[in-house]
Image (cartoon, rainbow, N blue to C red):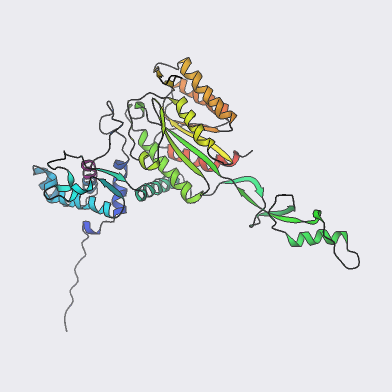
Amino acid sequence: MPTIRYSRYEATLDDLDMADLMKMIQDRLLESGFYRNPWDPDPNYQQSMQDLHHAIAEALINNDLVPEELIEEAMNAEDWMASQFGELVRDLAQRLESEGYLRFEGEESLSQEGDPGGVSSPDRGPGEVRFELTNKAIDFLGYRTLREILGGAGKSSLGSHETRFQTTGVEAVAESKPYEFGDIMNLDLPETFKNVARRGGEGGWLQFEYGDLQVHQAEYNSSAATVVMLDCSHSMILYGEDRFTPAKQVALALAHLIRTQYRGDEIKYILFHNSAEEIPLARLAQAQVGPYHTNTAEGLRLAQKILKRQNKDMKQIVMITDGKPSAITLPNGRVYKNSYGLDPVVLGETLREVGNCRRQGIQINTFMLARAPELIVFVQRVSAMTKGKAYFTTPHTIGRYVLQDFQSRRTRMVN
């Protein structure tokens, strides 16, 4: 009789799930420039294959997923990417691409003979092959961030946008009401017949009248249009901490929350600096901080244009910033800047746009990552003008504040 001998199973990197690898490198994928040179940021920087390889290598080393001898061999090699460790890293990068998490630009160079991972070729300098996050990666990172934030806050479910209002519908949640013109004809037949019976009948016949009709009530779930304004001025990475990457993580989590829980909602994103521009979520994930001032007025102006196009019950602006307004766009297109104190010209133009938001019923909720006295006064004034909320928070707690505010305070915005 043949003998079967069993040995202990040893996992290899071939068994590494790419979702687990994405968890390990997610902070590096969203990095905003803080770890390169915070004193001289490049707003146009796009992460290269070298950045990806370094992130994967760092994750493998930090999680003890490779033998020490492979690491030592790579450190002693003239080009670590030509070592066995480099081959492993390159294979994992290819697996991320094949499983739909990343998309390479200039991908044809990755398969060139003698070009290890596209990091060097006769026609291409080191690191010139770029990569982008796919929709699958954006969705994955958004879900991860959302779960971490709400889990840390002790939330067991994501909830829904319920309001204090009720409407007629299919699912009854309260006592019925007399029918009014425009209500859904979801009749409460027992109550309707009771009303008829109270009046009695003639000759055994029941006579229905308009006032007898009773309809069921259901919860009224409103829809909302939200514009998230993210400050990407230089100060967001300047003072010893990265404030912009947590802001981007909040944006990803908020997008995932809306996509999965509030299908009727709309959310758009704006970066504001010397000026302001709308940016899709896919590009926002890899956006970089630049040497900019803070043109809050231009951001508010653009947010109003976006919200005007939305036919929603509720409209709001979520502004994440760490500084005072320091720039405005003049009628001739020139940008006026003043970084010293709250310039009366800049402040006046900014508050003018806040007033326009108030007249359009747009609430502004501000999440301030700094606590200078003049900033506190400015933010409180903005919140008072639009009946919004002001939160003075940190990069570590901003996610919890933004998501809890989005879920709870929206219910009180219907009027």
Find residue 305 and report its horizontal and vertical position in percent. Answer: 50, 33
Q: Name the residue at 70% across, 56% down.
A: 185
> Relative to 323, is 317 on the left or the right?
right
> Relative to 280, is 354 on the left or the right?
right
- In the foreground, 29 or 108: 108
Find residue 78 and report its horizontal and vertical position in percent. Answer: 8, 42
Q: Name the residue at 46% across, 39% down.
A: 268
> Relative to 207, is 328 on the left or the right?
left
- In the foreground, 318 or 202: 202
Q: Is residue 154 visible?
A: no
Name the image quarter holding residue 215.
bottom right
| 95 over 274 or under it: above or below | below
Q: Name the residue at 37% across, 48% down.
A: 135
Q: Which residues are magenta?
A: 48-55
Quadrant in which the N terminus is drawn: bottom left
- In the foreground, 106 or 216: 106
Name the image quarter holding residue 253.
top left
Let me know if residue 54 is in the magenta part. yes
Q: Please name the predominant secondary structure of the magenta segment in the image.
A: helix
Quadrant in which the C terminus is drawn: top right
Let me know if residue 340 is in the magenta part. no
Find residue 194 and report its horizontal and vertical position in percent. Answer: 81, 61
> Relative to 279, is 200 on the left or the right?
right
Q: Is residue 245 visible?
A: yes
